[in-house]
Each structure stands twice: as C-alpha cells, then as structure tokens.
DNA sequence: TCAAAAGTGTTGTCGCTACACCCATGT
DNA sequence: ACATGGGTGTAGCGACAACACTTTTGA
C-alpha cells in the first residue's frame, strides 16, 4: 500500500451484502492483528487525507475483492468513547450490495481471510461490530422497500421468482405470488428481455432486467416506488 | 471553555429546527472568526476526546441556548476533502427539534449572534453548510411521515389545527381538514386533555397531548405510524 | 408420467379522497 | 351581528389481500 497519510482517529467499516443460494450473506474478515486476533469482523479501513470520505469504502472494497461499480450507502457514524479498546476512533459505517455471481474471490494485498456469513447466523464479532452490522441490516431492510436497490443483489437478468425470493429474504416476510407479480409489473420498471432460463428441469421462466430509464420517468411523474 | 482535548479533524454541526408563527425556522449563528467572518452558518463544534459522539451536539446546543432534553438525530457525515478551506475536517450533521415556546434566548459563553431564519428563505451559508442544511431538511421531511416526532416542535398541549399546520409546513403539502383529523385521531396516540384554548376570538379548540404510552402499544400491535 | 416451478383472474374489504355546512366565541 | 376558526359525515373509487388451478419442461 502506498505511504499515504491516513487520518488515524476515525475509520470506515463496510457491511457487504450478497445474495447466494437463497440466503442473504455478509462478507467478514478474520482479523490478523491484535487486538482480537483471529476474530471475525467487518472489513474496514482508514481515510486518506486527500481522499473524499465516501471514496474510502469504495476503494477499500476494491482492494479486498477487486470489485468495482458497487452500490454503497452510508448508514451512520458511531463514536462511543470506548468502542475501540486501543484509542478513540470514530467510525463511519457503509453498506454495499454486490452480485455474488460477479464476485471473484480475490485475496487482496492484505492476505486476509474473507468469509461469506449468512446474516441470520451472525457470530459474535470484534469490538462493537455487531451493533454496526445490525444498524446496516436495519437500514437495508428499510431502504429496500422504498428504493429499487435490490437489483444490485441479483444478476442483470433474473426471473420474477428470483426477485420475489430476494425480497422475502431481505425483508423477512412472505409475499403472495400473484399479488407480488402484479405489483412489480405494474410499476413498469422491469424490461422483459425476451430470454428464458435454460437447463432447468421445469418450465423455464422469463428473464427480466431492471429498467433504470423507466424508473426515472416514473419518478418524474411523481410516482413513488414501494414494495 | 474548559481546556478539554478536542478531536480537531472532525466536527459536529447542528440544524436546529423550530416552529414559530406558522413558519419552520432554523437557528443560525453569525461567524465571529475567520474564515468567512460575519457570514451565517450552522452552529457546530468539536468532540471532546472523552465524550461520546452523540453527546457532543447535545452539549453544544446546551451551551448555546441553555436548552436540555432535546430531540436530536444524526443526519449523516460529510467529508469531501475541500469542504473546509483551512484543513481537512469531516463533519457529522445532526438535526434537532425544539419548542420555540420553551426557548429562552440565552447567549452562551461564545457570545455568538443567534438568528432564527425561515427555512424557505435560507441565505447563502458558510462553507458547505447549505448542503448540510438541505440534507437535514430532507431527512426531517422523510422522518416526520413515519415517526411521531413532530410533537417536539409543538407545545405539550396543542389543537388539531396547530398540528395540521405544522405538518403542512414541514412537508410542504396541504391536507384536507376532515381527513386529517380522522386519520390522526384514529391512530389513537393523542390524549384529549379536556382543556380548551382561551382568550381566542373564536370558538375555542380542544387541546390534545401526544400519548407516548399509546404509541408504544400501537407499535407492539404491529401497527405502523404514517401520515 | 411425474416432479417442479411458471404463470394467471376475480372478489371482497378497507382506506383514501373529495366535498359543504353549522357551531361557539370574542369584538 | 359579524368575523374567525372549530368541528363534523358520506359516498365513490382504487389499491390491496385472499385464494387454486393449468402449463411447460426435463428427467
């Protein structure tokens, strides 16, 4: 890593969500330094003196995974005096949504162990990271209902059943199939690609794609997105 | 001010909202130091090394106005490299809701000029404070519809018309009188005090009070608050 | 032919909107 | 008596929830 000046009394931490095999997971690292050597925690880092705050988590995620073009949002800033045992550090928490299908496990320069952990089997994490994680999950669950961000967890092309399962997993609720499909199609923000699944041992589903343009138009009409 | 150690590369800034004479206003200070001497800006400050982050804006507001027991919420953290001209400072923005009726203009130790400015006549502020202000206002407008926080802007006892006017002012929308009253009363979170206005030159309105207990019960029933 | 998931309509209910007049009080 | 805001009911419409069967495909 280049010898850039870091700002040492605050940090950023990332909760990286991915959807894989019907489960919502978060990407954790195993700590390779004291304190709490070997414990799991959120990937974090410092902010360079000449770097915009919001650029730091994006850079950090890129260093860790090689991923670019990630949906990343600020959750909040945590600063109890005793949250970090060594010295006073205030941390800004972000959450990211990644397509696990795009994800190629690249061990970055840090040679840290990375693990995808299902969010409902979250172990005890280092420092106050369980609090940070819970705040991020709550924010995601709220945002997902009012913003069409969930598509960042799915491949570009997806079936309506895929979409419904992701929504059900993230919000931890069940939806009625017919009502869900009516609602989502009525929004008019999905584009039917004309393609279908293949190599499935049942009737192949149509594949849709999120239509950003149509969503913008919907906003201009003063319509709101809601699930 | 006591010689406490401050953390100097980040700060907190407060957007203090009050409702007065049918207008939503924010409390600004006139800067008494360079840079931007004499310009208006948000009241801000630093965080003491031995002070929880969320305690800093509460303390600062107390120093400035003598107010205690204030509704205060984090809006977000702003950290572009060039947002402050002198050096790199990352700032955490909070918004507060105060009852202007309770407010006694106490000039704190800082001897800063304080001004209530209507939010729709916001002048050009120092540094990036217009951005911080706009973020806070947007957050307030969103929160007010899903959380019963608006009562923090009103006296303990208020009429339904008072309440409707505050909602209309904050959200910048009109509501139908009959529908508004039905909706808000149906929530069952207002307690009729039995009291009425007096010294008004028209029929005196009933006075209500926000019933926190009833609101908690409503949440336990799984019902949501929404306006 | 079986298993597995895709796909499709109708009906009742509830909440929202739109809308106009009489009442109480102080001057 | 007049001006000012307080207080009230209803009808129509649209959105949402509940609900079960047929279709397609590969094994």
Image (cartoon, coloured by chain):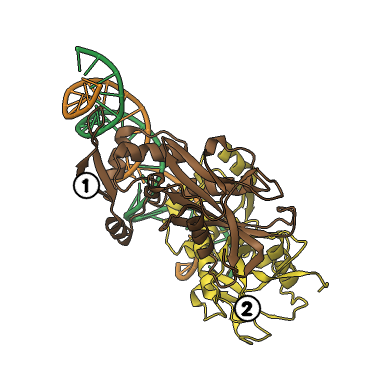
Chain colours: A yellow, B brown, C orange, D green
Split into 4 quadrants, where in the image is the C terminus of chain B? top left
> Tag on residue B193?
1
Question: Which residue is denoted by mark 2 in the rendering?
Answer: A87
Please tell me which residue lies in front, B199 or B220: B199
Q: Is residue B218 left or right of residue B193?
A: right
Please tell me which residue lies in front, B35 or A3: B35
Residue depicted at x 45% and y 50%: B97
| Residue A12, percent from left and from top | 65, 68
Chain letter, disc 1 residue: B
Please tell me which residue lies in front, B57 or B146: B57
| Residue B24, percent from left and from top | 47, 40
A48 relative to B190, above or below: below
B167 relative to A67, above or below: above
| Other residues around mark 2 within 10 Å, as few (<14) / some (14–19) / many (≥20) | few
Residue depicted at x 29% and y 40%: B159
A78 relative to B125, above or below: below
Chain letter, disc 2 residue: A
Mark 2, secondary structure of its residue: loop
Q: Is residue B68 left or right of residue B221?
A: right
The alpha-carbon separation of the residues under discs 1 and 2 comes to 51 Å
């Amino acid at each position: 890593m280049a010898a850039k000046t870091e700002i040492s009394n605050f940090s950023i931490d990332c909760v990286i969500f991915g959807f894989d095999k019907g489960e919502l997971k978060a990407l954790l690292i195993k700590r390779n330094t004291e304190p709490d050597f070997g414990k799991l925690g959120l990937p974090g880092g410092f902010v360079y003196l000449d770097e915009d705050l919001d650029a730091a988590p994006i850079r950090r995620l890129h260093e860790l995974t090689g991923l670019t073009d990630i949906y990343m949002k600020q959750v909040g800033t945590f600063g109890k005096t005793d949250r970090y045992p060594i010295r006073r550090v205030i941390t800004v928490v972000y959450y990211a949504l990644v397509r696990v299908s795009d994800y190629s496990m690249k061990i970055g320069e840090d040679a840290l162990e990375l693990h995808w952990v299902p969010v409902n089997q979250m172990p005890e994490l280092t420092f106050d990271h369980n609090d940070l994680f819970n705040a991020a999950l709550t924010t995601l669950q709220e945002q997902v209902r009012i913003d069409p961000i969930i598509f960042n967890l799915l491949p570009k092309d997806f079936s309506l059943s895929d979409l419904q399962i992701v929504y059900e997993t993230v919000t931890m609720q069940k939806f009625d199939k017919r009502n869900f499909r009516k609602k989502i199609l009525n929004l008019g923000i999905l584009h039917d690609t004309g393609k279908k699944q293949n190599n499935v041992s049942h009737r192949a589903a149509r594949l849709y794609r999120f239509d950003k343009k149509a969503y913008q138009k919907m906003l201009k009409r003063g319509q709101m997105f809601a699930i």
